[in-house]
Amino acid sequence: MQELGTGEAIARAKAVYDFGQTAIFASKADPRLQMVLYVPPTAADGRKLDLLVAVHGTGRTSAIDFRDGFAEFALYNDCAVLCPIFPVGIFGDGARSGYKFLEEGDIRYDLAVIAMVEEMAAKYDQDWSTFAMFGFSGGGHFTHRFAILHPEKLWAASIGAPGSVTLLDPTRDWWVGVRNLEARFGKPFKPEELAKVPVQMVVGDADLETWEITHKPGGRYYMEGANDAGQTRPERLASLARSFSDAGVQVTFDTVKGVSHDRIKVLDHVKSFLTTILKNRRAQ
């Protein structure tokens, strides 16, 4: 399809592809990575919005699920939704999990997300110097590690059913603990900053499969202590909640009855949490 240059055609294309449920955009900072957004049409008239970054799981298709699943919430709560897309096997090796641990090869996924947010803030003339983040499964991996490293960027974090967790343990190295965080990423752990972030942790009480989350010697991410937080996702998330709470973080822990590893069935709990945080944030 030819890209027309008339003013009317340009305006129509922006309405179709840049607002509402958007096209998939490559990141200018790293075109290997993409993003898709929901942007309320009111932003075209200059309305100011908050931002939710929603991070996909291992299958990546939840990027679209999250964009569409949060669309109504975003429209009625004056939010945009940005969903990064980190392709499988970006280095030709078929690897699926690099983004979950924030770095892979020459990519720092945490910094890539910050660059995406800055790019889209400029595109839509918004102040997204801070934002909320939600992730489920692999996205839950990413979200809690992003919060540990960049708490100053978040006004809320919702962590859904990660398979493995990084506890705030100063006696163990990354990714099991945070002892070498500054040496690894160039930033020290600041518990006082993390304690300012309202955090939700959400998991189904029937999310009990362990085949994908049990680390074994020889595995790419195996290290001593990799399985110490618990056997199942609810157990590991409970360990993370205790670790965060011990550091002074206010944690809302939601266990969803009768739900297994199903991202769609936890979204109402996430929306409820974010709605409350937004109400309090705007009241201040």
Image: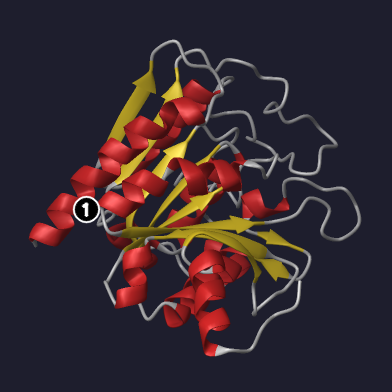
The amino acid at mark 1 is Leu
Residue lying furthest bottom: 6
Task: Please state, as top left, top right, bottom left or bottom right, where the N terminus lies in the image.
Answer: bottom right
Is 251 displayed left or right of 40 in the figure?
A: left
- In the depicted view, which residue is nearer to us: 196 or 92? 92
At 78% across and 29% down in the image, what residue appears? 216
At 9% across and 62% down in the image, what residue appears? 284
- Number of numbered discs: 1
x%, y% of residue 254? 33, 27
Location of residue 42 in the rendering, given as x and y in whole percent from the top left corner: 31, 66
Q: Quadrant of residue 139?
A: top right
In this picture, residue 46 sits left or right of residue 114: left
Residue count near mark 1 (Cα–Cα under 10 Å), binned few <14, some 14–19, many ≥20: some
Q: Is residue 174 visible from the viewing direction of this image?
A: yes
Name the residue nearer the viewer: 94 or 68.
68
The percent coordinates of residue 16 (x first, y second) are 53, 65
10 lies left or right of 118: right
Residue sitting at x 86%, y 61% = 91
Say above or below: 254 vs 120.
Answer: above
Residue under numbered circle 1: 278
Instruction: Please name the colour scheme applied to the rendered image.
Output: secondary structure
| Quarter-of-image position of residue 246 | top left
